[in-house]
């Protein structure tokens, strides 16, 4: 069942009834107001509303009706759509796919098809176009009470498959002022509901994006990045929404199409005579904040496990295209819980040194980086699944009011996601156990010890059993809590060392991958290794510890260090660990060269360290 707009005469009347002038009176344009020049916005902003709709779903008839709402100051000029000399066709369609029913809820699965509203005007190509599902916010943030949001849980209507969450254009914070965004007349065909959600879920639209494509996978493919999420002037794109409503006589929501846009010019790409998309739009045409963040969930074993809760935040930013190694500046990361949730407590604001301690974990792609966050002083204090609202602000910080005027919130612009932490008092399963071993060196002479750095994460795992070349008789048993183990062998040969972590009475055996070991009376040349072996972001004046324990070869060894400051190999150590302080801003390519009695080896690729002000 499709709902079409703009070209239907009855709907035109509806639009006119829903609209109003700035004085609050209904606005009925005459032919003198018809123009092909479309007014985007009088506000100095990259954000543009392409449309606002009240959407009504009747669970009895399984039908949906969408009423467009006028906002002449901030949306494309409605007069052009309803009086254009040549009708533009369908701007947007809501196509219900299915409506599975539960005992007290209905799932509305609907394909929203969006066409570019100005098919003949290349200069109005949109970027980072998002269809925002606006509804009531059932959960209030514990740190910032202006933030209200919903997610899928019992009794709460919400979008079940969001691409992300945004604060833009919610009617609570973007109404009022001298230039109200929602300047239409409430009534039968207007929005007479004040939706309370201020952080709302959205689906992403852009060229060549399938209706059900996972957005993180899409932007992890480098082939999809050159267009910078452009929604070009001739495009149509469909995205699938899965919305769960808990039954009432009539269910409703508001739907907003938000786009980013900036003044374009054919001069930007160097060819004044031809349009080059997106080359004729500067990077500022994309959104200022991260266009997407994705947080992985975490398990927390209460009350037995008092280790920090760790989870990763993958941050996607178009500004990273102009930064080395896909990184960009972050002003702060905020992690909070709903104020009603007394069994879980965290209000964590990472900024300055705290943000530096979080650090970038690795580069996931050209426009995304993963930051690992450890929450050290939090609950949960009971079993259950607990939500966290994560907000990532870019640097330099920009406020909503800077971009949208005095009717917008004064807080900093941010990208949002909801992540869940699963807490249980039951012992962890096998899959939870993190069992890692790093060995140095892996080639030695007889009776020379090899150092094993052992990490065992998971409760009730007591011992590490070490085995010689797949022999069932253990050579050594050490406590799982013993982080450093030295083992020496007398026999010459090459073999795989096996290791197993086990719990009480042999419960929960977990094997480690075989570790190749060489015992030789002849010297084995080194193969250099280093940790971290991935790009790292660091605040200026801070130090970073490098670990050469992954280097292979016969001990003893020395290590020459090149800190990427133009001085070459300027420091030599015989220890595996070395701490270096970066006192200057910039990008530093760190190298290490390992040396022993029979040779030297340098890292194949340097490790890039980006030092920033943060």
Image (cartoon, rainbow, N blue to C red):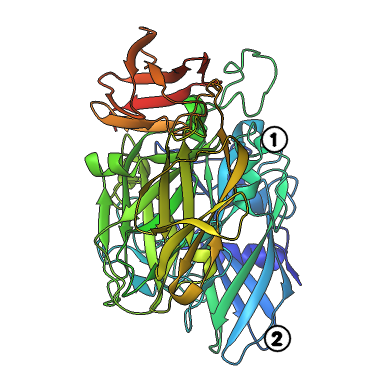
* Quarter of image, res 516: top right
Instruction: Name the foreground residue: 281 vs 80.
Output: 281
* Residue at 26% over, 69% down: 345
Q: Which percent across, then down, holds residue 500? A: 52, 59
Instruction: Name the foreground residue: 257 vs 191.
Output: 257
Q: Could you tell whether 91 is left or right of 448 in the image?
A: right
Q: Nearer the viewer, mark 1 or mark 2?
A: 1
User: Is any atom of residue 295 visible in this view?
Assistant: no
Judging from the image, what secondary structure is the residue with disc 1 in? helix
Q: Which percent across, then down, holds residue 537? A: 38, 32
Q: Which percent across, then down, holds residue 560? A: 39, 15
Considering only vertical position in the picture, is 443 above or below 38? above
* Quarter of image, res 138: bottom left
Disc 2 residue crowd, few under 14, some 14–19, many 20+, Cα 10 Å: few
Distance in Å between CA atoms under marks 1 and 2: 43 Å
- Number of numbered discs on residues: 2
Instruction: Name the foreground residue: 80 vs 418.
Output: 418
Q: Residue furthest top?
A: 567
N-terminal label among 1 and 2:
2
Q: Which residue is label 1 attached to?
A: 223
Judging from the image, what secondary structure is the residue with disc 2 in? loop
Disc 1 residue crowd, few under 14, some 14–19, many 20+, Cα 10 Å: few
User: Is any atom of residue 153 visible in this view?
Assistant: yes
Q: Which residue is label 2 attached to?
A: 61
Q: Could you tell whether 328 is left or right of 442 in the image?
A: left
Q: Quadrant of the N terminus?
A: bottom right
């Amino acid at each position: 069942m499709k709902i079409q707009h703009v070209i239907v005469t009855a709907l035109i009347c509806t639009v006119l009834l829903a609209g109003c002038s700035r004085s609050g009176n209904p606005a009925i344009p005459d032919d003198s107001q018809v123009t092909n020049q479309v007014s985007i916005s009088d506000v100095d902003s990259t954000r543009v509303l392409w449309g606002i709709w009240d959407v009504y779903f009747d669970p009895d008839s399984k039908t949906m009706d969408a009423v467009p709402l006028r906002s002449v100051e901030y949306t494309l000029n409605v007069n052009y759509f309803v009086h254009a000399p040549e009708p533009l066709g369908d701007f947007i369609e809501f196509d219900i796919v299915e409506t599975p029913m539960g005992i007290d809820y209905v799932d509305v699965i609907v394909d929203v098809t969006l066409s570019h509203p100005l098919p003949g005007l290349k200069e109005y190509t949109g970027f980072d176009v998002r269809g925002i599902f606006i509804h009531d916010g059932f959960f209030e943030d514990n740190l910032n009470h202006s933030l209200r949001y919903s997610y899928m849980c019992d009794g709460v209507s919400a979008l079940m498959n969001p691409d992300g969450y945004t604060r833009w254009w919610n009617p609570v914070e973007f109404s009022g002022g001298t230039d109200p965004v929602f300047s239409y007349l409430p009534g039968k065909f207007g929005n007479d509901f004040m939706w309370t959600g201020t952080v709302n879920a959205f689906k992403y639209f852009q060229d060549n994006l399938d209706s059900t494509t996972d957005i993180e996978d899409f932007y992890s493919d480098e082939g999809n990045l050159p267009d910078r999420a452009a929604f070009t002037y001739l495009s149509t794109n469909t995205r699938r929404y899965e919305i769960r409503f808990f039954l009432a006589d009539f269910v409703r929501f508001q739907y907003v199409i938000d786009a980013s846009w900036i003044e374009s010019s054919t001069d930007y790409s160097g060819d004044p005579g031809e349009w080059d998309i997106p080359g004729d739009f500067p990077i500022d045409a994309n959104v200022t904040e991260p266009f997407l963040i994705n947080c992985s969930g975490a398990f927390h074993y209460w009350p037995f496990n008092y280790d920090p809760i760790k989870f990763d935040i993958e941050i996607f930013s178009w500004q990273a295209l102009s930064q080395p190694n896909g990184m960009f500046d972050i002003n702060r990361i905020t992690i909070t819980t709903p104020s009603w949730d007394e069994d879980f407590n965290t209000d964590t604001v990472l900024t300055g040194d705290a943000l530096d301690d979080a650090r970038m974990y690795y580069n996931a792609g050209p426009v995304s980086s993963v930051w690992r966050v450890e929450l050290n002083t939090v609950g949960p204090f009971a079993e259950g699944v607990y939500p966290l609202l994560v907000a990532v602000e870019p640097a330099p910080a920009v406020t909503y009011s800077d971009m949208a005027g005095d009717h917008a919130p004064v807080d900093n612009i941010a990208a949002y996601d909801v992540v869940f932490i699963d807490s249980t008092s039951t012992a962890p399963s096998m899959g939870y156990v993190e069992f890692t071993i790093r060995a140095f060196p892996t080639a030695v002479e007889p009776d020379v010890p090899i150092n094993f750095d052992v990490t065992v994460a998971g409760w009730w795992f007591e011992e590490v059993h070490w085995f010689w070349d797949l022999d069932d008789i253990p050579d050594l048993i050490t406590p799982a809590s013993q982080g450093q183990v030295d083992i020496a062998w007398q026999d010459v040969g090459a073999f795989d060392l096996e290791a197993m972590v086990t719990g009480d009475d042999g419960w929960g055996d977990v094997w480690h991958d075989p570790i190749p070991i060489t015992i030789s009376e002849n010297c084995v040349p080194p193969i250099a290794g280093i940790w971290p072996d991935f790009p790292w972001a660091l605040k200026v004046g801070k130090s970073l510890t490098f670990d050469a324990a992954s280097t292979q070869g016969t001990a003893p060894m020395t290590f020459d260090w090149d800190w990427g400051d133009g001085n070459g190999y300027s420091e030599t150590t015989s220890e595996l660990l070395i701490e270096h302080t970066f006192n200057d801003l910039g990008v530093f390519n760190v190298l290490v060269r390992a040396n022993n009695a029979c040779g030297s080896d340098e890292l194949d690729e340097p490790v890039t360290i980006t030092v920033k002000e943060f």
